[in-house]
Each structure stands twice: as structure tokens, then as C-alpha cells.
Image: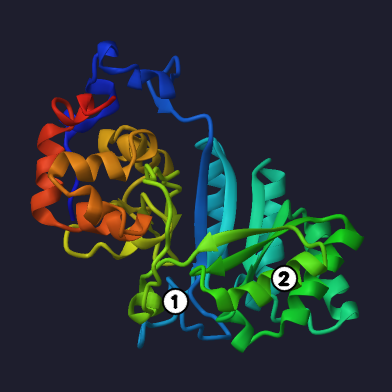
Amino acid sequence: MVFFPDPWSVESMPDSTGGFNGFQQQHSNGRTMNNNRRIAFGYSTRCNIKCDHCVAAHDGSPETKMALETAIQIIEEMSRSQITGISFTAGEPLLYLNEMKELVRTCKMQNIYSRIVTNGYWSKTRDRSDKMVSALKDAGLSQLRISFSRWHQKNVRRENILNAALSCQRVGLDYFISFVTDFRKEDDVQEQFLQDNQLKYFPEPLIYFGNATGIKQPPVFTDYPAHRCTMNPYLSPEMDMFACCDAGTQFTKTDAFYLGSLKSHSVDHLFQKKEKNLLFHLIKTMGLTAMASFLGFKASEIVKFRKCNLCEALFNSTDHLERLKKSATTELLHWTR
């Protein structure tokens, strides 16, 4: 595993370096805390469909699940560590409905915002959909995130998505539809369906990892994006915690985003490890584009990368990672306009 040593911690930086100490608060006990700690919580990797684009799936990858009692204890510890939001994800959480209701109730008791990410397989009829959404709302769920794409809809009818969204509207549960797309013209018909039914949705760019590794990337014409990332961490069912909830969990050449295991470290320790890491902070503020330019990538190369793929090029390369680490407190830090 790769662990960034203290020279890259935010606490080691003087205030004159751009005010990086300002994005955290120092508590009276000396702990560095972030006011907006959120995490993607992988309760189980089991899923009832096998989508061709799934970033979380690989051919032959085993199904794993966390014990309910363990998950409850972790959520209670997360509350003590000032975690403000938990998004239950990984496989299909609602395959374990009773357990998810218990976890959501725990979040509510601990005053933690809760979200469940679902493929909507359960909403085949209005009645079934209303019962599910009502049960989740009664348990205390804050929001339902419904996945939708031309890959999902090979396995789940888009009418399911409509049923789930309308149930949320009737019951009064906040929701949004995550419309995964690679911006091909053929996705227009899927998006038109969402628009025709006046559903709340947000386009989500396809991430070319996991099952999506072999999908050909179409040319996407855009301005020169900064490629900043919010860097929300991810907890796996095996209790491993990563600084990124998407592609960063698969940077196996360097393990650059691996924070550690809750089997041997506290929630607060692993969050602080992420928050003190200057390179992670620069991903959020400077952006990957500027970091790639610093390393010598040509603009004509950078513009062809999607964000997660550019991140892989920088952080899943031993040479690039070492250069970033060595320059993080000097040249890289001042690579600004």
C-alpha cells in the first residue's frame, strides 16, 4: 500500500501557500475536522443484474457482504466522527430490504443524511413501488438515487424507473435519477423519456472502468476542463476505505487512494488521513488538468481524457505519483495562474 508521509499533509503547510489550512477547522482537542464528511457505503457487492457498463463489477469478481451488526456499529462510529451523509451503494442495496431499513433507521437516529442507490428492479407496478418507497421513507431515508441508462434498461424496464420516481413524488421522498451516458446520439431517446415525464434527473458521464473498460469512447467536444473532483471516499464490504468512490478503488499499481482498513483503524483516523493529504486537496481545488500539464502532458493529450482516466494516468503510475509527491509542497503548489 502507498501511504503519503507527513510532508504532504495540510497541517505541515504554512499559511502563505494559498490558505490551504482554511479548508479545515482545528478543534480544541487538536483534531482536524472537515465540516462536510460524506461517504459511499458499500454494504454488499451483490447485484441482481449484470450491466455492461458497471464500474463496480468485473468478470469473475466475488460477491461480498458486510454483517448487519458490523455496519450498524460503523454507522454509530461515523456519527461520532462527524460524518454528515452516507450513500448506500456498491451492488443493489435493496436486495436486503429489511437490513437496509435497519441501517437507514440507524442513520436517522444518528442524525446522518442517508441515500440509497438502486436500479429500480423492485418497481414493476405502482402498488409495489409505492409500498417500497413508503417503507423506505418510514424508516427515515433522506433520498433515493435511481440509476438509468441504456445499459441498465437491458435488464430493468424504463417503466420501472418511472414508477419509482412517481412513487417518490406521491409519498414525498426526495429522489433523483442518475442518467449514465457516454453522450452518444442513441441516448437521446432515453433522455427524452425522462423529459417527457418531467422527472428530475442529472446526466452522469460513463466511467470507463470495471465492465466499461472495453467500451469504445466516442469523441466528445468540450472546452478545456479543469477536471476537479469532490473525492468522496468509499467503504467496501470488506471494511477497506478508499479516498475515491469511483475509479480510484481500482488503481492497483500504486494503491494511491487506499486509506486503510476499519479493522485496524478508526473512521476518524482514515478521514483525517484523506483530509490531510495535500495531493487529494489539489485534485479538488487545482484539478487534474493542471497537474497533468505540470507533469508535461500536452494539451492535445489532456483534452482527450475523461476525468477518471486522466486521474488513472497520474495516480496509477509510480513515476507520475512520485513526481507529484516530491513537488507537492514546492513547484506543483505554485503551478497556478
User: Crowding near pointer 1: few (<14 within 10 Å), some, many (20+)?
Assistant: some
Residue 259 sits above or below residue 250 on the image: above
Residue 237 sits above or below residue 175 on the image: below
**Residue 99 x/y as whole percent:** 66, 68
Q: Amino acid at mark 2?
A: Gln
**Residue 261 x/y as whole percent:** 33, 55
Q: In the depicted view, which residue is nearer to us: 85 or 332?
A: 332
Give the quarter of the image for residue 329.
Answer: top left
User: Crowding near pointer 2: few (<14 within 10 Å), some, many (20+)?
Assistant: few
Mark 2: secondary structure: helix
In this rendering, the count of numbered labels is: 2
Residue 221 appears in the rendering: yes
| Residue annotated with mark 1 | 64
Q: Residue at x 61, y 66 (%)?
A: 179
Mark 1: secondary structure: loop
140 left or right of 185 in image: right
Give the quarter of the image for residue 1.
Answer: bottom left
